[in-house]
Amino acid sequence: MSGRHEGYGLFSLHTPFTPPTTEEDRLAWLRLIRSRRVGPATFWRLLAEHGSALAAIAALPGLARDAGLSSYDAYGEEAARAELRAGTRTGARLIFRGATDYPPLLAQLGDPPPVLWALGQPALAARPTVALVGARNASSLGLRMARALAEGLAAAGVTIVSGLARGIDAAAHQAALEGGTVAVVAGGVDMSWPVENAGLAARMRTEGLILSEQPIGMDPQARHFPQRNRLISGLARATVVVEAAPQSGSLITARAALDQGREVMAVPGHPFDGRAGGSNLLLRDGATLVRGAADVLAALGLVPEAAPAAKPAQAGDGERARHDAPPQARPATARRLPAQPPAAPLPASDSPAAGPDRRPLSRRILDLLSASPVAEDQLLRDLAVSPADAAPDILALELDGHLRRQPGGLLSRI
């Protein structure tokens, strides 16, 4: 029993799919998906073969023996009840696939998560959605682009989806918070990671929405991030990569979007900046080039809510039918992507135990700079330091040949 079985999905169910309706059924669903070696695809296969989650749980020990496991116990009923109680204490809701508040785009995947913990406003996931992803060690220009995209899309009524990591994710969530934003996390919805995003996460639990497949109270683990990335793309009509290295989690998210039949878009970056290497590869291989929110809205056929629009197309109009079609039926923009990058371990700076940014100021300055010039006052705002505090480090980096001053108060990395 592996976590994924290709070829099994909702359409392999022998009877029409219905969500659990009784407390006993809901408890059984939670027990089954939490059982060892049972992932979403295996869950749906077992449900199809045995007719109910309770029957599947009863069959698990025998199936495990047939697979060569000498000892196997399904997830216990008391453990499942304890998880439900923990969710109630944190104010989270357990959403089952098939329920009215389950994210509609996620439900269209071949093997969607049977259950999701949610903190916040589930209705945000039912609006038009776009994922913004990118580098954790984002440049100043990358952060500005993420904020501008998130603000512009949110103003047009689009919900921004990301992963609540540092860098591009945090910038996108922060900029879209008033308009609507959803985070998919690799740990429990009640866990704040990274620590410096604790305040943002607290606001999102009330003003936005945080979703997770993982149990309440679970710390994020490296093995959960690829699956988290798949849900980010699955929740969105399009994934926009703002800034990403050639081997990064953002490209995994883009590949998942392509596999799911969703749009893949990217912001171009300077060829000398390694953080833009993955984005530029996506563009080379057919992703839609994004210069601003208008490009995303145009590619998806969306009209900003605040802008005066032409008379809407009538029901049956071919153009409207094309835009309202399920994402699987819409052609993906990118037809091929770079070779699958290896799943890299979580960077030490992004490990769950990481605390507030304690890097030397000179290191932070270099990380925000790129080959593309940025205004010094913008850099200082991104650093949240005064000109007097930053001046010695900027001068030292300039004398050491690490950065260059350009006319107009611009700085660039050498």
Image (tube, rainbow, N blue to C red):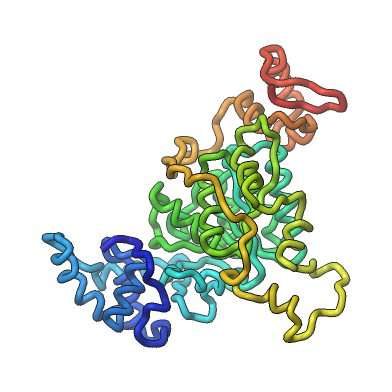
* Residue at x 13% of width, y 61% of height: 71
* Residue at x 50% of width, y 67% of height: 118
Q: Tell which of 32 and 249 is nearer to you.
A: 249
Please identify the quarter of the rendering in which residue 401 is found: top right
Q: Which residue is farthest left?
A: 70
Q: Tell which of 286 and 44 is nearer to you.
A: 286
Give the quarter of the figure containing the N terminus.
bottom left
Q: Tell which of 269 and 331 is nearer to you.
A: 331
Q: Tell which of 395 and 217 is nearer to you.
A: 395
Above or below residue 142? Residue 87 is below
The percent position of residue 13, horizontal first and vertical second, equals 37, 81
Give the quarter of the figure containing the C terminus.
top right
* Residue at x 42% of width, y 71% of height: 115
* Residue at x 65% of width, y 44% of height: 284
Above or below residue 231? Residue 107 is below
Q: Which residue is farthest top?
A: 399
The percent position of residue 354, horizontal first and vertical second, equals 47, 39
- In the rendered structure, the answer to whether residue 181 lies left or right of residue 111 reads right
- In the rendered structure, the answer to whether residue 357 lies left or right of residue 305 reads left
- In the rendered structure, the answer to whether residue 405 lies left or right of residue 359 reads right
Above or below residue 171? Residue 28 is below
